[in-house]
Amino acid sequence: MAGFTAIIVAIVCHLGLREKRDATATSNETLTKPTSFWQRWLTSMSSIPEVFKFGLSDPSLGLGLLASFVARSSSVGISLFIPLFVNASFCDNPAQDVGDVKEHCRKAYVIAAQLSGVSQLFALAFAPIFGYLPCRRQRINITLTLATLSGVGGYVGFAKLNSSTITPILLLTVALLGISQIGTIVASLSLVSHFVLDNRGPVGRKPAVDHNSVENPEEIALLPKRPATFETHEHLKGTIAGIYSFAGSVAILVLTKVGGVLFDHLGPQAPFYLLALFNSALFLATCGYNALDCRISRKLK
């Protein structure tokens, strides 16, 4: 059923998302545009190295891809390793009677479902908040900063607790996990979209004003001295979306494999410490991004 649904969605997207013709395009641009399937395919493939190059050189795109990696790994951690951790807590807790396997598994399943539900509830509640913050003009990326700090505190705290019983502290830690997950998702999308729409550097820049379009000469001295035009990357938006999804898919594969091995050999807490390490690395990258943003803001004044 899932495969059939995917085929129907692919057909609908192919018919509904066809490339629009540019009415302002000249006849020369139309003639030089690739027409055959293989020409378009080769042109598209040539943009992949360009996007990777931008990911290493542009802070917005690079941080957005890294945030995509952490966001998808957080999704795996919540959906996969929380039930395993709860089940391991039941097995390791001598106060729990594990003689009845069916009853033991049912209790572990109920607690894991409750913890995952609380995590997703807080993610849903904070989604509009984190969606509003990137729209505000700010020198630091508050969304990603709060999300990474929540992730570090939540994963470390959850790994140190016994999840065989529901406690307020345990609910607080899983709430932080949901906040971290939705924050990294929203922030990564915001960073990547800012890179696609304009190349003005860190997030939070106002549109530049063309000094030649100002009629009153006295107003020119009051305008900020910035370039009148900026380079856009809309021609790479499809490739950027693919690389963005690729970064998240790599995170799923890495955390599933590495986290599973660590779970078996080091203990049930190991995957959560690994996720805390991911969030710590993203937090340090965010601090560097914020510092660069503040430095550029002072130069533009």
Image (cartoon, rainbow, N blue to C red):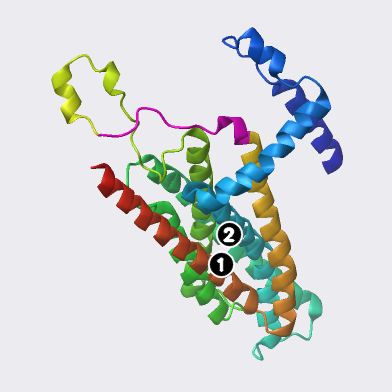
Let me know if residue 1 appears in the view: no
Image: magenta residue range = 225-237
Specify whether 91 is left or right of 182: right
Question: Residue 178: where, in percent of width, then height?
Answer: 53, 59
Question: Residue 250: where, in percent of width, then height?
Answer: 70, 57
Residue at 33% x, 30% y: name it: 208
Within the magenta stretch, is there residue 230?
yes
Residue at 72% x, 34% y: name it: 44
Residue at image mark 2: 70
How many residues crowd mark 1 within 10 Å: few (<14), some (14–19), many (20+)? many
Query: Toward the viewer: 170 or 27?
Result: 27
Residues marked 2 and 1 touching at CB (< 8 Å): yes
Residue at image mark 1: 278
Query: Toward the viewer: 167 or 50?
Result: 50
Query: Toward the viewer: 141 or 97?
Result: 141
Quarter residue 204 falls in? top left
